[in-house]
Amino acid sequence: MRTLLLLAAAGVFAAEAPKIVNEGYGDFLLVPAGTFKMGDNFGDGESRERPVHPVTLDAFYIGKFEVTNADWKKFQGDPGYDDPKIWPGGRPVPREQSPYWKQANNHGGGTPNSDNYPVLGVNWDAAAAYCNWLSLKTGKKYRLPTEAEWEKAARGTDQRRFPWGNAIDPSYANYIGSQPLDTGQIAGYYDGSKRGDFQTKNGASPYGVMDMGGNVMEWCQDWYSRSYYEVSPKKNPKGPEKGAYRVLRGGSFFVESQDLRSYARSGAWPSFLAYRMVGFRPARSAE
């Protein structure tokens, strides 16, 4: 025992990473290092979701919730918002860039009682800038998740169809028909314990991440390519070196349940503002 204590004191045994970190900008959950199989193992998807291939990732953290209007207001109101260094290409976009910011029916951040809803209509450039801003504020490395990180955080290592399992109904996620008006729901609403439903339904992923199926689609770091899986490296893939579109994941309130599959993938022009159904969540390096 004395030898073990001496080794630990000398730093021979690395300290285990905490399962959750919060540096004042929300909870981030640990996704441990390891290998998972990425892609459509059910045969119900598109060719761009195949072939299934093993991917090994380093450990990382990912936001438990999608970035909310309250989170975005902290960034929007900060003097550092206009710092060109945090913006892709050095070009800040207007603080109220989203056309939905003042729409109450979409729970826009500029309307009453909207703080807990996901921010809508933020383009890729602004999502990346928010992550860079978090890095400056905390001294840690925040960024958008890679496409591979996003999928592992959503489905774990057992190749499940949806973050919570293989079946879906409106008590798990927000998609077409889940509520009277197809729009965003409060971040984390589909955590069964928060709604008093402790025994049955819970829309969390294996790591406890909420809303990775439905609510709003989420930007990833990678450039998008339909055929990338055919050439993807086996360790820490980061997508093609260039492209026209950035990866979107997760489905939204404005799509059918089929598009909430944890391996479904698509892409969009990164500077486009008019996506009512698009938001994002940051990731954080584990170091």
Image: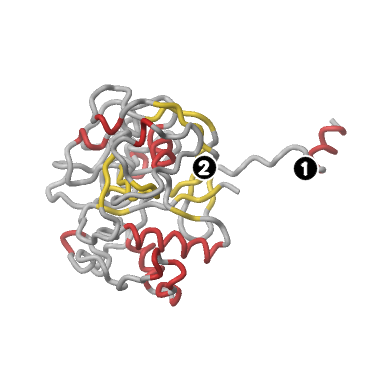
Query: From the viewer's perspective, is residue 269 above or below residue 153?
Result: below
Classify residue 276 as left or right of residue 118: left
Q: Going 20% across and 64% down the picture, which residue do you hit?
A: 100
Name the residue type under label 1: Gly
Query: From the viewer's perspective, is residue 168 above or below residue 272?
Result: above
Please tell me whether mark 2 sits on a helix, a strand or a loop. Answer: strand
Q: How far apart are marks 1 and 2 (CA)?
A: 22 Å
Classify residue 59 as left or right of residue 269: right
Disc 1 crowd, CA 10 A, few/some/many (<14, 14-19, 20+):
few
Q: Where is residue 243 in the image (x, y as percent from the top left)?
A: 33, 49
Q: Nearer the viewer, residue 51 or 181?
A: 51
Colour setting: secondary structure
Query: From the viewer's perspective, is residue 21 above or below residue 233?
Result: below
Extreme-right residue of the structure: 2
Name the residue type under label 2: Leu
Please tell me whether mark 1 sits on a helix, a strand or a loop. Answer: loop
Q: Where is residue 176 in the image (x, y as percent from the top left)?
A: 15, 42
Disc 2 crowd, CA 10 A, few/some/many (<14, 14-19, 20+):
many
- Residue 14's quadrant in the figure? top right
Quarter of the figure with the N terminus:
top right
Q: Tell me the tag on residue 55.
A: none
Q: Which of marks 1 and 2 is nearer the N terminus?
A: 1
Q: Tell me the tag on residue 11.
A: 1
- Name the residue beneath numbered marker 2: 30
Q: Disc 1, disc 2: CB below 8 Å?
A: no
Q: Nearer the viewer, residue 123 or 183?
A: 123
